[in-house]
Image (spheres, grey):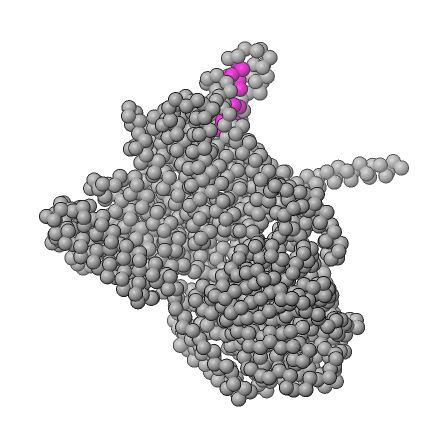
């Protein structure tokens, strides 16, 4: 009897470990971990102090590297989250200012994550429909500048009208920017990758033109005028916290997209066309319409992302330099395996990293571009599952359909 | 058997005519060019205005007399030519040469545009053409890289990333070890990056678009990171100061009036470009290696059954493609300003792909297409200086808009290598 | 004298299946050996091993008595073994010469191709064996029969002594098949040896010197054509007494369901694919469209199902005009469609089985209400259909890609049959399937016919058409050149029609054979 129960116990644990090794969640964690390791090595390899330390002795060099890596990632953490100890004590103290200061990193990271959620959902939707939308950046720009226009042009409107109006215009601008490559792909077969990239550059230049010309502020050159107060997205806390309802709108969009994709007939069609446009056509689905609509909606969501930045944070268009959101969003979507709810999580990961990297750069001098490298590495590991699988000795995933 | 053959019903084969619709549409477009010239340009120019086309580009070359003409008369002539061509196309059609005629009409439209804009003044056409050649270099080289890869069946979207990696490596190594070593290092860097793309897309059979994008993201991130690190530290600034190749005026050729300075008075990148275009054309279509490469991109299974090593062929093609892209990237630094700037490639890697498609996956065709893009770039920068009535930023979108128009197939659907983009799997033949 | 080729104990395992089970095979010089077996029996695997595309797990290959190693196609080529594949391995945009010399190029100095010398050699071979091929022609311009000859030239160019021909008659008219057999005999007379893979019994009897039958990975018998009969061979192939005749009652055709009048279809390059075609299909009858692949059948079906535009003419279903309607409108008119290419056009392989089963109906009540999918209804429907049609699947949520070909086809059939239909358009419904699945699907189709559905069957397998159809229309070069009564038409007459030769059908006295070949 005893022997039997021991055997059972063992197998339960074994089963658990096996299931874990098969789970894609663990897989994602390992991909992230591997990326962080390589990123850390890169950071160490390009820092002067490390070389100096190596010159003294090997041991010191290693110590210095580890020190640097620790500093880098810990400042990344505190920059994105905050200091946990501080956050707890502040809560208990009840002092408003203390609380604000302690939770600032966390809340600011949420603000940074918001556009990632929008654009991540946009690109995930595109992928599910079988289109590769690299134009999220340009669509974001159009959403940004047009919502700015709506923000400063209409005066005297109550916020309850002005905010949705400005958001709506941003939505439509992005939709247009996605519609054009979508239509071109559907009608002429032109590859959307190149076309969306071209639309990006057109958007950048167009924005540059607008802020230097027709939309220029009469006083401050090369900026648009500040948007009206009534167009600003309501903030939840007092300054300097910038956390606003945009975050919740983003979550809403992600949930809505999840519902559309998996629970509605439209989503069924989108996924069908993405997986097999020929069979979809044979079954009666209008693949052309789906392609166009998906790219347009994808563009619209990106545009909304741009609008959320404009109406929630920046309030005026001051530049036409790439924000990087559109490209990072590709990583966000891939990391989440194109699942809208997963996108929320991966968007927050990237948003937190992005925000935290500022502190990291301040403290260690490591340029924030390392985040792009990390992203590239993470997608690399995700895209080449075989590499991770062999390295960490994982098993093949299950062969059934999960929603 | 034989007499049964004779009883075969003779099928009335109706003549195959290329789409009448297309013929008319193209003709209408060309006609429209003519109408546009008259409507927008002729009518807005005074009868006395004269335009001067300066044909002598700078650069210490032989002077060629300027071309001066009455703007209105010139514009009307141009409009007339376009209208005539358009009418002929609608009625009869140029068939095989339709695309060429369209290009000619486009050229006339452009000349008219210049004539109009420079009305009352002068414009250095020679200079613009010279800049066009210069600007077309990275696009041509990038397109050649694309041809190498796609002809073997592997879509290479990572040309942009390989270019920028090449540029940075050229800058850093060039600063340390001189221009030639820098160039070589860039080629190597491109090749190494390509190995990554090759492994991902050939061995692991990852979607080639995703694989290419990964490399782009990582390359752009990595190069920005490194150059920021360098710029942060004053002591390291010497690492981003390679200088650039000086122009070489070819002995006899550069003295040819008008053409000489435009084609033969550049730095060695341009000459390399000429050589590579010819070399690649010959290799692709006249050698055994080229035949096998193309077979692998059209029908890898067929090649496999005949003993051609599909995987090795593709690896080699992709690596060569990367090397070419790295070489193209080095031009941005060593053939131009002499140091590295963040995101200095500005999408040329993607425009190269459009040039490749436009050029029907041939080296010479790609060169022709890149000249078009190069001209658009030259035009944009030139015109903003000249105070043309259209704002500079909008003109800068010209290359991108043209790319989209080209891809939309205004110039006819082109067909790429049949197996491009499809990972090859060794499986049963049934 | 030792046989020119000998395979001993060849064994090959794939995950879950033993494709070749200790197979022994001898090929003598100057002989045509037929390898007979149904789809999935293991003959292709065996030949792929011989050609170096697979490695055997066990067993040896001997040439002229000596053991040789074949690890890749080049080894096979070096050993004088060549293969003419069922699906041609030709690059459409290359010329004949380029295709022939690929991999064994004639060179001038520095790796430059000697195109002239190669072209001359191609012409030489073509003349020697009466193949009639122009070295400079582009493959995509050549008709299928000639393309096959290019494949043969490829082998002869490399001095192949042993030729493996894989289902060579699949794409030929009966007359072209006769020509092929002539060429094969010619080759053998000039010293070559041939292994001829097929599942067609009659051809084997006509053309081979010896027959080997394979079933489920094992050799189950040898026969000499003079002494064998189709029945015996069929039994060996399948392993049991075979239904040699589909039990079907006489058709009772009702009203016209599908009416096609003067339909002309033109492709992208303005080439006429379907030329002024007219026919009817009535309720309760099967109209079979016979013809060699490439004579317009594919385009006809695509037009009828809404995927291709008609240039002129009209299509009516139950009296309502449906010309150029969208696929969905046509489906809603009561039309079901089993597409030619089940994996590309019929199923979304990454979808679970339950979703593929509602691929045409997901948006209708009760599967969806107000655009929202009803999972309970979808699941229930899936469970019922899986049981009803005996679809072998791990579950309704299993990915469709994991099912066998036959079961995948059953998913399509189940889906199409599960809604009320007036017209079924079936294109190559049993291509590549095992005999069991073929019997099942044929049975279901006849049952549907007896329920009153009109069926348009398009198939390049003449036997299938002759088995199932009540009337047969023959398509040649885009035209329907004859519509005949299936009961009186003979295979020879149909073959002539398929080659474009108008003959009187029924003039010859119909043979009193009641035993038809099993469906191949």
Q: C207 left or right of C272?
A: right
What residue is shown at x 46% (from left), y 29% (from top)? Answer: A164
What residue is shown at x 57% (from left), y 11% (from top)? Answer: A94
Which of the image's four quarters has the C terminus of chain C? bottom right
What residue is shown at x 50% (from left), y 71% (from top)? Answer: C276
Comparing C254 with A24, the one in front is: C254
Q: Quadrant of residue A25?
A: top right
**Range covered by the magenta-colored residues:** A98-113
Above or below, comparing residue C186 to residue C243 in the picture: below
Q: Position of residue C166 (x, y in %)?
A: 61, 73
Q: Does residue C125 appear anywhere in the picture?
A: no
Q: Position of residue B406 (x, y in %)?
A: 36, 53
Residue B236 belongs to magenta span: no
Comparing B21 with C518, the one in front is: B21
In the rendered image, the residue lying farthest to the right is A1
Q: B181 left or right of B47?
A: right
Which of the image's four quarters has the N terminus of chain C? bottom right
Q: Does residue A126 appear anywhere in the picture?
A: yes
Q: Position of residue B291 (x, y in %)?
A: 44, 66
């Amino acid at each position: 009897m005893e022997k039997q129960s021991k055997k059972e116990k063992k197998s339960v644990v074994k089963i658990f470990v096996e299931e874990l090794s098969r789970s894609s969640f663990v897989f994602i964690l390992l991909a992230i971990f591997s990326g962080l390791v390589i990123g850390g090595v890169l950071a160490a390899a390009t820092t002067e102090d490390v070389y100096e330390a190596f010159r003294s002795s090997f041991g010191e060099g290693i110590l210095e590297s580890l020190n640097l890596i620790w500093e880098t990632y810990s400042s990344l953490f505190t920059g994105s989250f905050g200091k946990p100890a501080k956050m707890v004590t502040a809560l208990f103290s009840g002092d408003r200012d203390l609380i604000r200061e302690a939770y600032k990193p966390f809340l600011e990271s949420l603000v940074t994550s918001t556009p990632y959620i929008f654009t991540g959902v946009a690109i995930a939707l595109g992928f599910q429909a079988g289109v590769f939308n690299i134009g999220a950046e340009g669509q974001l720009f159009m959403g940004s500048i047009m919502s700015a226009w709506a923000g400063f042009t209409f005066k005297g409107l109550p916020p309850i009208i002005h905010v949705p109006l400005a958001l709506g215009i941003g939505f439509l601008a992005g939709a247009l920017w996605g519609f054009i490559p979508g239509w071109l792909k559907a009608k002429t077969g032109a590859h959307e990758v190149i076309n969306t990239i071209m639309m990006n550059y057109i958007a950048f230049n167009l924005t540059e033109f607008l802020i230097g010309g027709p939309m220029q502020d009469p006083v401050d050159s090369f900026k648009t005028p500040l948007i009206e107060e009534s167009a600003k997205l309501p903030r939840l806390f007092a300054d300097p916290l910038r956390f606003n309802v945009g975050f919740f709108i983003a979550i809403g969009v992600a949930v809505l997209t999840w519902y559309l994709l998996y629970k509605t007939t439209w989503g069924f069609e989108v996924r069908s066309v993405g997986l097999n446009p020929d069979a979809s056509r044979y079954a009666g689905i209008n693949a052309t319409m789906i392609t166009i609509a998906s790219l347009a909606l994808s563009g619209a969501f990106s545009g909304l992302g741009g609008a959320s930045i404009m109406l929630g944070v920046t309030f005026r268009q001051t530049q036409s330099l790439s924000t990087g959101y559109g490209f990072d969003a590709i990583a966000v979507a891939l990391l989440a395996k194109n699942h809208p709810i997963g996108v929320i999580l991966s968007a927050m990961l990237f948003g937190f990293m992005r925000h935290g990297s500022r502190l990291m750069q301040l403290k260690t001098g490591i340029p924030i571009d390392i985040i792009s490298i990390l992203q590239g590495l993470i997608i690399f590991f995700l895209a080449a599952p075989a590499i991770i699988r062999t390295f960490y000795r994982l098993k093949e995933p299950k062969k059934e359909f999960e929603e | 058997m034989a007499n049964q053959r004779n009883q075969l019903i003779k099928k009335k084969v109706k003549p195959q005519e290329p789409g009448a619709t297309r013929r008319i549409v193209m003709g209408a477009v060309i006609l429209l060019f003519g109408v546009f010239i008259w409507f927008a340009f002729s009518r807005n120019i005074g009868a006395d205005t004269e335009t001067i086309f300066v044909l002598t580009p700078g650069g210490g070359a032989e002077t060629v007399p300027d071309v001066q003409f009455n703007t209105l008369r010139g514009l009307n002539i141009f409009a007339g030519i376009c209208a005539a061509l358009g009418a002929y196309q609608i009625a009869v059609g140029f068939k095989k040469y339709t695309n060429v005629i369209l290009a000619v009409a486009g050229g006339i439209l452009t000349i008219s545009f210049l004539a109009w804009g420079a009305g009352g003044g002068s414009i250095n056409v020679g200079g613009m053409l010279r800049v066009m050649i210069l600007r077309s270099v990275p696009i041509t080289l990038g397109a050649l890289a694309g041809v190498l890869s796609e002809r073997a069946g592997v879509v290479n979207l990572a040309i942009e990333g390989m270019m920028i990696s090449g540029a940075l490596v050229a800058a850093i190594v060039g600063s340390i070890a001189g221009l030639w070593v820098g160039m070589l290092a860039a080629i190597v860097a491109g090749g190494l990056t390509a190995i990554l793309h090759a492994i991902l897309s050939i061995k692991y059979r990852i979607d080639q678009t995703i694989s290419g994008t990964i490399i782009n993201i990582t390359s752009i991130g990595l190069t920005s990171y490194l150059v920021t690190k360098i710029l942060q530290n004053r002591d390291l600034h010497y690492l981003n100061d390679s200088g650039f190749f000086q122009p070489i005026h070819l002995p006899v050729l550069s003295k040819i009036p008008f053409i000489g300075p435009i084609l033969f008075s550049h730095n060695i990148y341009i000459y390399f470009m000429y050589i590579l275009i010819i070399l690649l054309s010959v290799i692709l279509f006249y050698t055994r290696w080229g035949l096998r490469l193309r077979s692998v991109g059209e029908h890898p299974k067929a090649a496999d059954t005949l003993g051609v090593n599909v995987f090795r062929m593709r690896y080699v093609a992709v690596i060569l493609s990367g090397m070419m892209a790295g070489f193209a990237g080095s031009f941005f630094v060593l053939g131009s300003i002499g140091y590295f700037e963040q995101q200095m490639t500005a999408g040329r890697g993607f425009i190269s792909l459009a040039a490749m498609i436009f050029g029907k996956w041939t080296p010479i065709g790609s060169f022709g297409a890149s000249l078009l893009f190069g001209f658009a770039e030259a035009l944009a920068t030139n015109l903003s200086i000249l105070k043309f009535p259209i704002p500079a930023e909008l003109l800068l979108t010209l290359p991108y808009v043209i790319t989209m128009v080209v891809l939309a197939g205004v110039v006819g659907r082109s067909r790429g290598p049949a197996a491009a983009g499809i990972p090859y799997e060794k499986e049963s033949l049934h | 004298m030792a046989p020119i080729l000998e395979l001993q104990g060849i064994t090959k395992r794939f995950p879950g299946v033993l494709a070749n089970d200790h197979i022994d095979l001898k090929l003598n010089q100057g002989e045509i050996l037929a390898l007979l077996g149904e789809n999935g029996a293991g003959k292709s695997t065996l030949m792929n091993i011989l050609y170096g595309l697979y490695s055997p797990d066990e067993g040896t290959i001997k040439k002229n008595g000596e053991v040789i190693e074949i690890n890749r196609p080049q080894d096979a080529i070096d050993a004088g073994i060549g293969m003419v594949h069922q699906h041609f391995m030709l690059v459409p945009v290359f010329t004949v010469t380029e295709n022939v010399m690929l991999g064994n190029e004639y060179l001038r100095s520095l790796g430059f191709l000697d195109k002239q010398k190669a072209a001359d050699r191609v012409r030489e071979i073509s003349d020697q064996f009466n193949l009639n091929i122009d070295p400079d022609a582009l493959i995509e311009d050549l008709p299928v029969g000639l393309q096959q000859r290019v494949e043969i030239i490829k082998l002869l160019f490399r001095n192949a002594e042993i030729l493996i021909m894989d289902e060579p008659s699949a794409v030929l008219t009966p007359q072209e098949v006769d020509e092929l057999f002539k060429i094969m005999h010619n080759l053998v007379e000039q010293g070559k040896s041939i292994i001829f893979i097929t599942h067609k019994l009659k051809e084997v009897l006509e053309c081979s010197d010896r027959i080997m039958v394979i079933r489920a990975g094992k050799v189950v018998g040898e026969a000499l054509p003079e002494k064998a009969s189709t029945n015996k061979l069929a039994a060996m192939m399948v392993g049991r007494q075979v239904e040699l005749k589909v039990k079907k009652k006489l058709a009772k055709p009702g009203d016209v369901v599908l009416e096609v009048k003067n339909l002309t279809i033109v492709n992208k390059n303005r080439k006429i694919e379907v030329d002024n075609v007219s026919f009817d299909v009535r309720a309760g009858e099967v109209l079979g469209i016979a013809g060699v692949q490439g004579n317009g059948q594919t385009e006809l079906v695509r037009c009828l199902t809404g995927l291709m535009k008609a240039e002129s003419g009209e299509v009516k279903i139950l009296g309502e005009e449906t010309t150029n309607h969208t696929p969905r409108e046509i489906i809603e008119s009561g039309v079901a469609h089993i597409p030619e290419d089940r994996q590309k056009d019929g199923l979304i392989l990454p979808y679970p089985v339950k979703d593929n089963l509602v691929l045409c109906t997901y948006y209708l009540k009760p599967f969806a209400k107000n655009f929202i999918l009803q999972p309970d209804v979808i699941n229930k429907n899936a469970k019922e259909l899986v049981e009803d049609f005996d679809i072998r699947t791990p579950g309704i949520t299993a990915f469709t890609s994991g099912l066998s070909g036959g079961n995948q086809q059953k998913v399509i059939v189940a889906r199409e049959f599960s809604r009320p239909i007036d017209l079924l358009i079936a294109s190559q419904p049993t291509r590549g399937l095992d005999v069991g699945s073929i019997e099942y699907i044929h049975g279901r189709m006849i049952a549907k016919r007896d329920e009153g559905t009109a069926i348009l069957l398009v198939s390049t397998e003449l036997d299938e058409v002759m088995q199932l159809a009540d009337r047969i229309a023959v398509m040649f070069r885009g035209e329907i050149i004859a519509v005949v009564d299936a009961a009186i038409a003979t295979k020879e007459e149909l073959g002539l029609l398929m080659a474009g030769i108008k003959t009187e059908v029924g003039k010859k006295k119909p043979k009193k054979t009641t035993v038809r070949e099993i469906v191949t």
